[in-house]
Image (tube, rainbow, N blue to C red):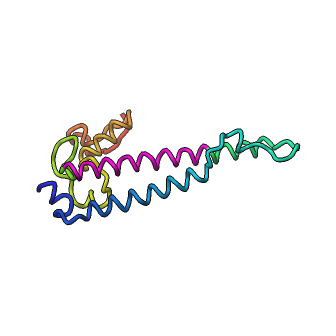
Amino acid sequence: MSSDDAQGAGDGSAERRLTAERERLSELRRSLRQGLSGESENESLSELSDVDQHPADTGTETFNRERDLGILDSVEAELADVESALGRLDAGTYGVCEACGRPIGPERLEALPATRFCVDDAELSAAEAAPGVVHPVATGGDDLREPGRPI
């Protein structure tokens, strides 16, 4: 299977999905940035009156701001993945696993259009990211009786 096969027989569907995802993520990023409005945490927590703010209120505001900043970081990382996938599409390497060089299955590309890895290599990557857990693919299948068992 060529990379054209992996990207939907070259019909442009991958490019359409990636472009739509880029637009969605860009709008979400814009909305999050607007919600954070560029003010510092101290400015966003400042009181309009002389009455002290309860510490729990300050904690809630801090939590909400940190959550929103975390979501923004996640959206920006996803957007970078989509931009990278569009670059691979232009270079003719879209749909080819970056780890093993084999084609990525069309079902996986449909579900995760910006993916860089085939299922096997994505599982290996996840196993490496979770130290202390034996993954059956990482061990050559020896541990198939107890996949994901703690070591």
Front in this rendered view, residue 140 or 4: 4
- Foreground residue among 137 and 82: 82
Residue 81: x and y, percent? Answer: 35, 48
What are the residue bounds of the magenta stretch? Answer: 66-91
Residue 22 lies left or right of residue 69; in this view the side is left
Residue 65: image location, x then y, percent: 63, 45
Q: Quadrant of residue 130?
A: top left
Q: Residue at x 58, y 48 (%)?
A: 68
**Residue 135 vs residue 30: left or right?**
left
Residue 67: say if magenta.
yes
Q: How far from the left and from the top, in percent, is residue 71?
A: 52, 48
Q: Is residue 37 magenta?
A: no
Left or right for 138, reference 76: left
Question: Measuring 82% from the left and 47% from the top, which residue is drawn there?
Answer: 48
Q: Is residue 20 above or below residue 74?
A: below
Looking at this rendering, what residue extends furthest in the left direction? 1
Viewport quadrant of the N terminus: bottom left
Q: Main secondary structure of the magenta part?
A: helix
